[in-house]
Image (cartoon, helix red, strand yellow):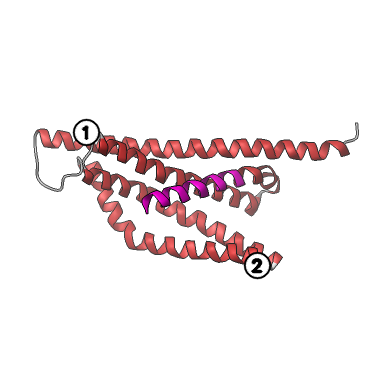
Amino acid sequence: MTALWIVITLVLSTLNALGAGYAWPESKERGGLAHLVTWSVTIMASIGFTMVLTLFNLFVALSMHWITPELAARGEALCFSLIAIPILGTGLVITVDAWAAYRRSRSLADLAVAGYDTWAQVHNTYVVVQHLGGAMRSAGGLFRGGGSSGGSSGGDTDSDGAGALIVILLVAAAFIGGVLITWGLVKVARDESTARMRMAVAPHRKW
């Protein structure tokens, strides 16, 4: 199930990033809600890549015995705590735009997209409401000296503190990686879209 989720997330994030890139020149020119939607799709793509990279980083660290399973769980909680509100905010913008598109076109395809976006937004809101508080409490343990809930001291405390620092750095690296991957895809698609627009305009240009 986790492998399937990873594949789906990577595919959707890639499509979102490329779609945002192709729409970037026109939406930037139009400004307003159009460009806000493009930014929202870009952020959503970045979040997807970040979640996958977080799981990968924590899995590698756990396999190398750099961190404990409890610290890995706290790392996942930290990632969730940081992306929860952006997911809801960008999802709301995308959902509103999807319904606006359906209102203009009245097409079955746009209705399906709006329906899926609405379902995803409701589901994400439910998950955040149910789990954000616990995730924040769990992630907070990383900043209180580690993942151990007991009263260990000495070498164990030092080990927990080092492990917590590793987890925080791995999550930070995942966020940076997610942003870089997303922006790389957006830039490729944006440049291609800009080139196409220039080619379309060139035959009509008067010299």
The span from disc 1 to disc 2 (Cα, nearest Å) is 54 Å
Q: Main secondary structure of the magenta part?
A: helix
Residue 14 placement (x, y as % from top left): 53, 44
Q: From the viewer's perspective, tell me whether residue 50 is left or right of residue 18.
A: left
Q: Nearer the viewer, residue 5 or 173?
A: 5
The image quadrant of residue 151 is top left
Q: From the viewer's perspective, tell me whether residue 64 is left or right of residue 110.
A: left
- The amino acid beneath tag 1 is Ala
- The amino acid beneath tag 2 is Leu
Number of numbered discs visible in the structure rendering: 2
What numbered label is drawn on residue 57? none
Residue annotated with mark 2? 108
Q: Nearer the viewer, residue 169 or 53?
A: 53
Few, some or many C-alpha atoms within 10 Å of disc 2 (few <14, some 14-19, many ≥20)? few
Residue annotated with mark 1? 162
Q: Secondary structure at mark 1?
A: helix
Rendered-image quadrant of the N terminus: bottom left
Residue 133 placement (x, y as % from top left): 30, 57
The residue furthest right is 207
Residue range corresponding to the magenta coloring:
1-19
Rendered-image quadrant of the C terminus: top right
78 up-or-down from 169: above or below: below
Question: What residue lies at 46% left-to-right and 40% top-to-bottom?
Answer: 178
Specify whether residue 3 is painted magenta. yes
121 up-or-down from 184: above or below: below
